Image (tube, helix red, strand yellow):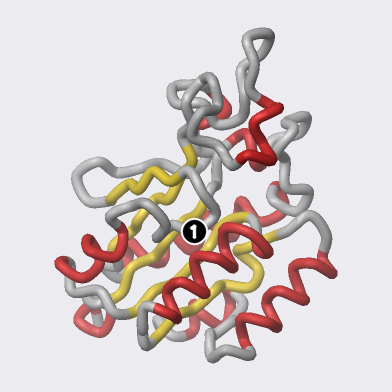
């Protein structure tokens, strides 16, 4: 059974405190509701020997590497979102990087592929199938998915209820857009049946 998943990687995107926890200026409103499902996706992936890749944002304290429209969140009076080494940049409770088996990609833009070594790492690891969970659907999830499709990954899956957006309507519309370009969009339950 494990051989079936050897060329698969799970990308867990932006499941960090500043995107999930209440009160952050970057909080994704639907993020808290998917934490349990993301934990389960990671558990299922590990049970089957799927490579887990943590895609996180870690920014410069001065915001010099942040998109121009977000730079106002970074100034000398307060710490900006997902600054490297801060509590806000840490994974939410229940998600843990296993240093010996997992891989971590740090990004500063929406796509996990933009300005990172993700594509070359996946190629050298023999990965051709991607499974994606995390936040947020219209930005980092969608951009990563579209880049994966444009890079000719033949099998891209987004776990519909292990991804989230600010509203259910935005999430659903983006899931439909991804489905329309050939991306699989099962629920966690549907995806877990593939392991049976």
Side (left or right) of 187 relative to 6: right
The vertical placement of 65 against 40, above or below, is above
User: In which image quadrant can residue 142 be found?
Assistant: bottom right
Numbered circles on residues, count: 1
Q: Residue furthest left?
A: 124
Residue 194 place in picture, x, y as percent: 44, 85
Return the residue nearer the eye: 105 or 66: 66
Residue 183 place in picture, x, y as percent: 53, 85
Return the residue nearer the eye: 149 or 2: 149
Q: Mark 1 points at which residue?
A: 111
Q: Residue at position x 69%, y 60% from top?
A: 164
The vertical placement of 169 against 68, above or below, is below
Residue 35 place in picture, x, y as percent: 61, 51
Q: Residue at position x 76%, y 74% from top?
A: 172
Residue 119 place in picture, x, y as percent: 29, 65
The vertical placement of 47 against 18, above or below, is below
Q: What element carries label 1?
A: loop
Q: Residue furthest front?
A: 68
User: In which image quadrant can residue 156 be found?
Assistant: bottom left
Q: Residue at position x 24%, y 77% from top?
A: 7
Return the residue nearer the eye: 37 or 119: 119
Q: Which residue lies furthest to the top in this view?
A: 77
Split into 4 quadrants, where in the image is the N terminus? bottom left
Side (left or right) of 25 relative to 63: right
Q: Residue at position x 45%, y 26% from top?
A: 84
Split into 4 quadrants, where in the image is the C terminus? bottom left
Q: Residues within 10 Å of mark 1 (few under 14, many from 20)?
A: many
């Amino acid at each position: 059974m494990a051989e079936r998943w050897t060329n698969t990687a799970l990308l867990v995107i932006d499941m960090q405190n500043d995107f999930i926890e209440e009160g952050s200026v970057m909080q994704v409103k639907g993020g808290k509701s998917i934490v349990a499902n993301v934990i389960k996706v990671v558990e299922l992936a590990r049970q089957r020997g799927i490579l887990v890749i943590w895609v996180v944002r870690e920014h410069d304290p001065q915001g010099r590497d942040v998109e121009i429209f977000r730079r106002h969140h970074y100034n000398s009076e307060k710490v900006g979102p997902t600054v490297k080494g801060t509590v806000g940049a840490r994974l939410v409770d229940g998600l843990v990087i296993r240093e010996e088996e997992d891989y971590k990609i740090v990004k500063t833009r929406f796509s996990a592929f933009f300005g990172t070594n993700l594509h070359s790492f996946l190629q050298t690891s023999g990965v051709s199938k991607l499974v994606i969970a995390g936040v947020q659907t219209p930005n980092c999830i969608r951009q990563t998915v579209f880049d994966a499709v444009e890079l000719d990954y033949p099998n891209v899956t987004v776990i519909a209820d292990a991804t989230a957006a600010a509203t259910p309507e935005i999430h659903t519309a983006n899931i439909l857009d991804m489905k329309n370009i050939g991306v699989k969009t099962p629920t966690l339950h549907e995806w877990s049946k593939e392991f049976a």
